[in-house]
Amino acid sequence: MSRILSKEIHLASRPTGIPDITNFLVKEVDIKNPGENEVLVKNLWMSVDPYMRGRMTDRKSYVPPFQIDKVLEGGAIGVIEESNSSKFNVGDYVMSNFGWREYFVSDDNSLNVINPEFGPLQAYLGTLGMPGLTAYAGLLEVGKLKDGENVLVSAAAGAVGSIVCQIALAKGCKVYGTSGTDEKCLWLEKEIGIEKAFNYKKIDNLIPEYRSEIKGGIDVYFDNVGGTHLEAGINILNTGGRIALCGMIDQYNDPNIKNGPSNLIMLIMKNASIEGFIVSKYNHLQEKFLEDMKNWSNSGKLIWKETILEGIDLAPKAFINLFSGENTGKMLVKIH
């Protein structure tokens, strides 16, 4: 193979608060020739996700932290350019965790072939990938959703939240959500079809707003935010209600430890439950998840929206923009 130079995004320094462009470094590296049972992959798409912020901090978690001056990692879709593996052919589309780079060489055990006929390639990083499975498992397994219940979703216009809304609607539920702009709220109500979207940036206290607008309370609260959103969700929860704790973007960039909700005692009074979860626990649901998503999509019950930046150099900007709510639906970087 002729020489290939690949751009990679490395972690230059650990951020304090919201990451900025100085925390990232673009490097060019030589790509080696693939050896036995190895393949050369050209990345086409990569994902940026809020959980990556946690990996920028040097602390123990469910995944190891990113290392200074090492290439970052994350979901990516690529195409096989060269193959010395019996498992993959040139031209196969594959999903990997080797995002944040243009090209890479990998052994054949670190990749999964995807079917481009099932949906757009990039959908495997969103609706048909980790965010979609997060929504599916969190709502149905953790939230134990029953048909016809009332559901509240925070960050409802995001990659996970927008899918949660639509799965709940497909189950005949009334769905309410929060978002940070009027434009996103309008999209949730008019395009997705939820009952009411609340622009939390225009609301001083969510609790009276919820009590005024949500008739019959909430049976399942899917939380991506934490903080005052979680406190308000607990307040509006019905007896026997369930909270699926997916994320706490409210705290991802805060170096200080925050006090928890002041109304946790209400969970006892309401015989309610709250459960945090990591999506990898539910990988065994993959086949059923894809089958259901395909059926909902074919019946017009599932749509998705993407926010796309083009070029590997803009990957840091795409990631940073997550924390100012610049995306509607999935934030993606188109590399090639």
Image (tube, helix red, strand yellow):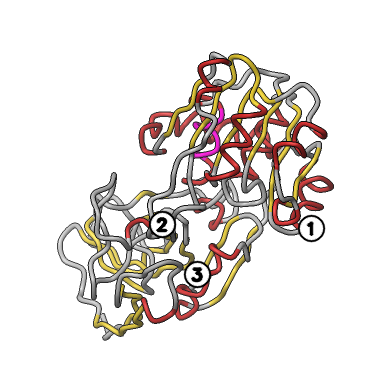
Q: Secondary structure at mark 2?
A: loop
Residue 34 image offset from top left, x and y in percent: 21, 68
Question: Which one is earlier in the sequence, the residue at label 3 or at label 2?
Answer: 2
Q: Residue at x 60, y 22 (%)?
A: 145
Which mark is in front, 1 or 2? Answer: 1
Circle 1 packing at 10 Å, graded few (<14), some (14-19), many (20+), is some
Quick check: is 273 in the magenta stretch?
A: no
Read off the residue under disc 3: 320
Please give the range of residues in magenta.
133-139
The span from disc 1 to disc 2 (Cα, nearest Å) is 30 Å
| Residue under label 2 | 75
Residue at the left extreme, as displayed: 36
Q: Quadrant of the N terminus?
A: bottom left
Crowding at label 3, few (<14), some or many (≥20) Cα neighbours within 10 Å? some
* First of labels 1, 2 by sequence position: 2
Q: Amino acid at mark 1?
A: Asp
Residue at 74%, 24% in the rendered image: 172
Which one is nearer the viewer's eye here, 178 or 202? 202
For numbered disc 3, what is the local secondary structure?
A: helix
Label 2 crowding class (10 Å Cα cut-off): few <14, some 14-19, many 20+? many
